[in-house]
Amino acid sequence: MWSLENGKSGVWNCMFEPAYNIEQICETMKKATGMNSWIPSVNDKFLMGVAAIVGPIGGKAVGIHPARVKKIMVSTNINGDKLKNSGYQFHWILEESFNDWFEDCNRVCLK
């Protein structure tokens, strides 16, 4: 918010308000990239338990790490009221953002 309040420009990490949940993000990403994969919905406590067990026995090599699992759950649970109330207008909706990102990656993958 400091950057906006002080007229600074640049690229920032921020979130939409109202916030999208992980399922909405995954489905939108699939639509933008043309993926047809089924993504299961898993309870957060179950997922943390699996990460705690699988992480130390090789899961960390493929990103199954308790700290990373917790981060994805916590980082999508934030409140964007201050940004929304500042009058800032996003240039794209979520789907357009993924489409733009996918185009930047030559429609091969999201890097």
Image (spheres, rainbow, N blue to C red):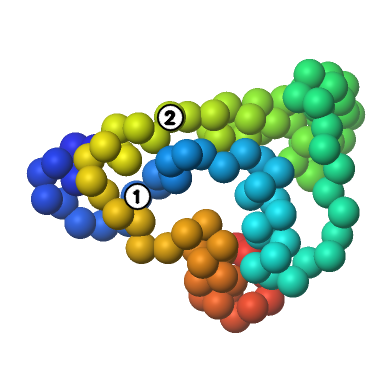
Name the residue type under label 2: Asn
Q: CA distance from mark 1 to mark 2?
A: 16 Å
Query: Where is the C terminus found, in terms of image quarters?
Result: bottom right
- The answer to whether residue 30 is left or right of residue 39 is left
Disc 1 + disc 2, Cβ < 8 Å: no
Question: Which residue is drawn at the image coordinates 78% and 67% (left, top)?
Answer: 35
Element at badge 1? loop
Name the residue type under label 1: Trp
Q: In the rendering, at what x and y percent does residue 17 appear?
A: 43, 41
User: For residue 73, what is the image quadrant?
Assistant: top right
Q: Which numbered mark, 1 or 2, is in the foreground of this view?
A: 2
Q: In the rendering, at what x and y percent does residue 53 appear?
A: 87, 22
Q: Which residue is mark 1?
A: 12
Residue 93 is tagged as none
Residue 79 is tagged as 2
User: For residue 74, what is the image quadrant?
Assistant: top right
